[in-house]
Image (cartoon, rainbow, N blue to C red):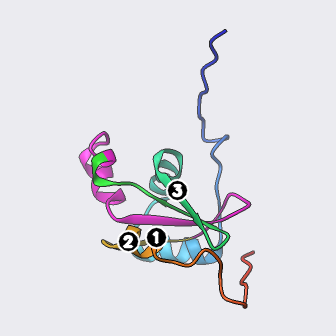
Amino acid sequence: MNTQLTYTDEQHRLDYSKHANRRASQRGVSKSTMRTLVRNGNVIRKQGLRYYYMTNNELKYFEKDLQDEMRNLVVLMAGDSDMVITCYKNESALKKIKHKSKRLAKRYVTYN
């Protein structure tokens, strides 16, 4: 029996912290772009957080405008929920994320 998964906005509903809303607005990143990145991008789990990104090789399958919006974009989410904490653009983000320690320092910050 073949089953096909379909993704709708209801299945990928993301919650956004006040900080994420503010930063996305300042950086010109739309919520639909963040949703697309989370749905189709790669994830690195570190420090109790999830870092979503997309490589240049994967971006070529998207429209040119969307490629420009998602290039070097990182969406940071809480590890156990669908809460977007922040988003940012950084050319060397993948390298910096990979060099982070597995755990946060003794002070652990929770996001609400």
Mark 1 → mark 2, Cα distance in angstroms: 5 Å
Which is in the foreground here, disc 3 or disc 1?
Answer: 1
**Image quadrant in which you'd find residue 96:** bottom left
Q: Which residue is mark 2?
A: 95
Q: Element type at marker 1?
A: helix
**What label does residue 98 carry, if any?**
1
Label 1: how many Cα within 10 Å (few below 14, some 14–19, many 20+)? few
Q: Element type at marker 2?
A: helix
Labelled pair 1, 2 in contact (Cβ < 8 Å): yes
Left or right: 87 with respect to 104? Answer: left
Label 2: how many Cα within 10 Å (few below 14, some 14–19, many 20+)? few
Left or right: 65 with respect to 76? Answer: left
Q: The N terminus appears in which quarter of the rendering?
A: top right
Which of 14 and 72 lies nearest the eye of the viewer?
72
Q: Which residues are magenta?
A: 58-85
Q: Which residue is mark 3?
A: 43
